[in-house]
Image: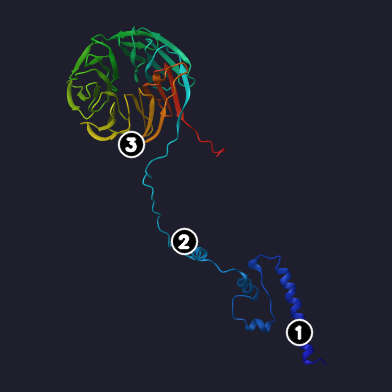
Amino acid sequence: MKTTKETILQFLSENLIQNSLLSYKNLFLPYSQKRITFPEKILSQKKTLITKLEYKNLLQQPPLKKSKISESLSLLSPPFQNEKPEKSNNQNSNIKNHLEWKIYRVISGHTGWVRCIDIDPTNNFFVTGSNDCVIKFWDLASGTLKLSLTGHINTVRTVLLSQRHPYLFSCGEDKMIKCWDLEQNKVIRHYHGHLSGVYALSLHPSLDILVSGGRDSVGRVWDLRSRQQIMYLEGHSNAILSINSQSDDPQILTGSNDTTIKLWDVRNGKCLNTLTNHKKSIRKIIIPDFEYSFISGGCDCIRIWKCPNGNLIRNLRGCDGILNGLDLGDNILVSGGEDGWVRFWDYDTGDVFQKNLVPVQPGSLSSESGIFDIKFDKTKSRIIMACCDKTIKMWKEKKIDFDNE
C-alpha cells in the first residue's frame, strides 16, 4: 500500500507533465487558441474568465498611457457615436487648386508685331494679323503655317472668323474692312465708311450684321450681304478700342479710349446706358458663355458687370500698366499687357494664382515683351498669345508626374 505522501507526489507529477506538454503545444498556436487545462477539482473551483497564463501575461505588460487608453476605448465604442465634425481653420478653403501654366511652343513667322488672334470654330487652326500687313493661318496642333493672305496696306488690327459662314473678317489701320471667302481664299466684300483706322470688329451671333469701331469714335453696323451701313452708333468722344455683341440685351457693347463703356439697343441704334466706373481707357470687353454678364479690361483694373443694365458686380485689382489681352477659360481669367506680365486669375475668388513675365525672343529688346492679344482655344486647354517680339506663344497646363514624386 502506498502512503498518502507517495500518492500526492504521484498525482502532482502526472499533472505537471501533462500541463508542461500542453504549454509546449501552446507555443505554436495563436493567442486566441491558447488554453491551459487543470485538474477537474481545480476547474470546478475556478470562477474567473482569465486563465493563469493570461493573467501572468497581463501582469508582465507595461501600464498603458492615457492616450493609448483613450484609443483603446474609442475602438470599443459604437461607430460614429462620439465623432464631431472637424472645424477648418483655413480661411482660403474655397480657393480651388489650379495647375501651373507654362509655355510649350513659340512660333515665329511674322516680320512685325503680332496684333490679333482668332480661333477656328472647329478648333483645327487659328488666324493671326500683324504689323507686316499679312494674315496667317496656323495649324493648332502642330503650329505649322498653312496659308498667308495679303491685301491690307497697313497694320491688321483685328481678325474675326465667322461661326456660321466660311468667312474671315479683317480690319486695319488702312481704314479697310475686308470679308474673305475661305473656300476661295480671296476677298469677296469691302465695307467702306470709316474715316480713319478701324480697330475692332464683332459679329452678331444670330443676325447677319457686323459691328465695327475705330479711331473716328463711331460704331458702324453693316449688313453682311448688301455691304450697306444700316446703323450709326454715335456717342463716344475718343477712339473705340473694343466691341462685343450678344443675342440678349444689351446686344452691342463698346469700350473706348474715353474711359466709358456704352450699351446699345440694336433695334433703334440708341445708347441704353453709359458706364463711367473706369478711370482709364477700356481695351477689351469679353462676354462669358456661362453667365449673364460681361467683363471689361481697362488700364486701371478689371471689372465684372451684370447684364442687362450694367450693374457693377466686383473689381479685380492687381493689373499694372496698359492691359491689351483678356480672355476667360474654365474658371480661369488670363490678362496680359504691354509690360509683358501675364496674370492668371481664379474667376470665382478674384485672386491671382500665377504671374509670369513672358520671355522675349532671342535677338529682341527687353522692351518688346508686350502682349497684344490672348485667346483660349475651344477646349479651354491651351492659350495663344500675340506678342510684341513678332512671335506667337502657346501655353498649356503643366502635368503632374506622380511617378517621380
First reached walking from the N terminus: tag 2 or tag 3: 2
- The quarter of the picture where the N terminus appears is bottom right
Choose top left, top right, bottom left or bottom right for residue 344: top left
- The quarter of the picture where the C terminus appears is top right
Q: Which residue sits at x=29%, y=19%?
A: 202
| Up/down of 192 relative to 301, above or below | above
Q: For the residues marked 1 and 3, what is the alpha-carbon distance in whole angstroms?
A: 90 Å
Q: Could you say whether the residue bearing mark 3 is in a helix, strand or loop?
A: loop
Q: Circle 1: is it few (<14), some (14-19), or many (20+) Cα within 10 Å?
A: few
Q: Where is residue 311 in the image (x, y as percent from the top left)?
A: 22, 33
Q: Could you say whether the residue bearing mark 2 is in a helix, strand or loop?
A: loop
First reached walking from the N terminus: tag 2 or tag 1: 1
Residue 350, numbered circle: 3
Q: For the residues marked 2 and 1, what is the alpha-carbon distance in whole angstroms?
A: 52 Å
Choose top left, top right, bottom left or bottom right for residue 218: top left
Q: What residue type is labelled 2?
A: Pro
* Front-most of residues 361 and 214: 361
